[in-house]
Image: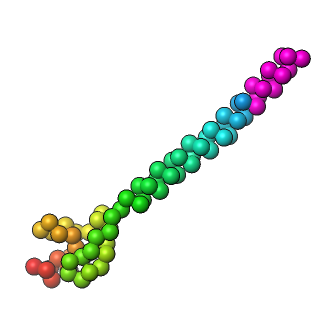
Amino acid sequence: MILKLLLVGAVIYVVYTLFFKQKKSFDTQKKESHKEEAVNELIECPTCGVYVEVEEAILSGSKYYCSSECVTKAS
């Protein structure tokens, strides 16, 4: 009888760790990826005033521009 209870408890523990522990790690990864997306900073183009992400902007003379046209207009 005790052996059956231990076996049932072990099965419940294994099922719990397989399904619920993985879900928590998946939720953690999802939150971290969401934080990385939120890090993208918007800056204003000094020529036209359009806001653009830093990763997509063009750096010229210590200023960020939205396009190559704005870079030539500023020069």
Q: Is residue 10 left or right of residue 37?
A: right
Write down the quadrant of residue 39 in the picture: bottom left
Q: Is residue 8 left or right of residue 40?
A: right
Write down the quadrant of residue 55 in the picture: bottom left
Q: In the image, which residues are magenta?
A: 1-12
Q: Is residue 37 magenta?
A: no
Q: Position of residue 11 (x, y in %)?
A: 76, 28
Q: Name the outermost residue toward the left.
A: 75
Q: Is residue 45 left or right of residue 24?
A: left
Q: Considering the image in quadrants, where does the N terminus appear?
A: top right
Q: Position of residue 57 (x, y in %)?
A: 26, 69
Q: Considering the image in quadrants, where does the C terminus appear?
A: bottom left
Of 21 and 59, which appears nearest the observer?
21
Q: Residue at x 46, y 53 (%)?
A: 33
Q: Position of residue 73 (x, y in %)?
A: 15, 83
Q: Is residue 5 magenta?
A: yes
Q: Residue at x 76, y 31 (%)?
A: 12
Number of numbered discs overlaid on the protein picture: 0
Write down the quadrant of residue 5 in the picture: top right
Residue 25, compared with residue 46, is above or below; it is above
In this picture the colour scheme is rainbow
Residue 72, compared with residue 20, is above or below; it is below
Q: Residue at x 44, y 55 (%)?
A: 35
Q: Position of residue 31 (x, y in %)?
A: 50, 52
In terms of secondary structure, what is the magenta stretch mainly?
A: helix
